[in-house]
Image (spheres, rainbow, N blue to C red):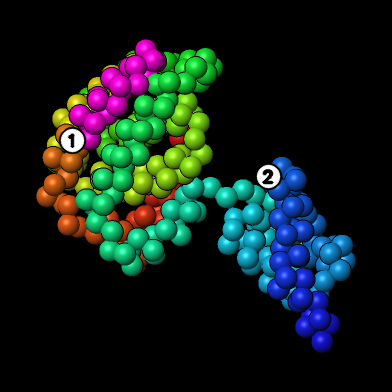
Amino acid sequence: MKDTVEARPLRSGSLLRRLREEILAQPTGSNLGTETEIVERMKVGRATLRQAARILEQEQLITVQRGARGGYVTRRPDVHGIARAATLYLSLRQATIKHLSVASRVLNIEVYRIAAMSQDAARRETLRRTIDELKATYDQDMTVSEYLRRGERIRNCILELADNPFLELFLRIVYIFGARMQTASVFTDHPERMQVMEARQWRVGEAILNGEPEVTAALNAEGWRLIESWTTPFDGDQAVDAADKSPAAAAAGPRES
């Protein structure tokens, strides 16, 4: 009976709201306390708290650590979790490689144009150093995985320069699924394409550093036309399969910084 009465704050949203406020007010990795401590502090029953905890875990706001020294530990959502959630939706909508390619092209061109207009000196210097490091460590015999990691380093710098959280979120999602697509025969059967695209990434990065938004957009569009000519044979293929663990595995991988 107690939990039936005390479930009202959860239904009204007040318990979740209070917990979210407490979580977001603390750094990632902070311990909110044990279940017993939180029950006493929030004046709710255990069943009610556990119901709220399941929702917060789905939102990637907490991790529940079991055991004698366990408790509720704060965390922050990341784009990989959002991509995993998007997998089912995109699968049901039968999203194809063509859909993915178009979304990537449109978003990339605009984000790179915005980045070229940025006056953030520190972030521009980070991009410059990254390009210099990639040039110095270039290996024409690199693997597809290494090529993707190197490309991600430049993209991370450019997304930071663009400084648009909405565009960053959408682009990171398409990048995750795009990485899966690019590990197919697009590059594995044609390693010379990686050399072509890496050189183009450097040119686009340099145009951004030169503060040339239109040149950046034109180079980016040209690069995407090239990629689309390579992926045309796969246009009708489904980009996402909810039963396939590949997107989740890619999403769970470490993010380059």
Mark 1 crowdedness (10 Å alpha carbons): few <14, some 14-19, many ≥20: some
The quadrant of the image that shows the N terminus is bottom right
Residue 21 coordinates in the image, percent (x, y): 74, 52
Tell me which amino acid carries mark 1: Arg
Classify 109 as above or below 24.
above
Magenta-drawn stretch contains 154: no
Left or right, 35 with respect to 224, comes to: right
> Which residue corresponds to the image point at 40% horizontal and 21% vertical from the top-left?
116
Q: How many marks?
A: 2
Classify 233 as above or below 6.
above
State yes or no: discs 2 and 1 in contact (Cβ < 8 Å). Answer: no
Please give the label number shown on residue 225. 1
Which one is in front, 9 or 133?
9
- Residue 65 lies in quadrant: bottom right
Left or right, 95 with respect to 111, comes to: left
Left or right, 72 with respect to 222, comes to: right
- Residue 101 lies in quadrant: top left
Please give the label number shown on residue 48. none
Mark 2 crowdedness (10 Å alpha carbons): few <14, some 14-19, many ≥20: some
Q: Which residues are magenta?
A: 207-224
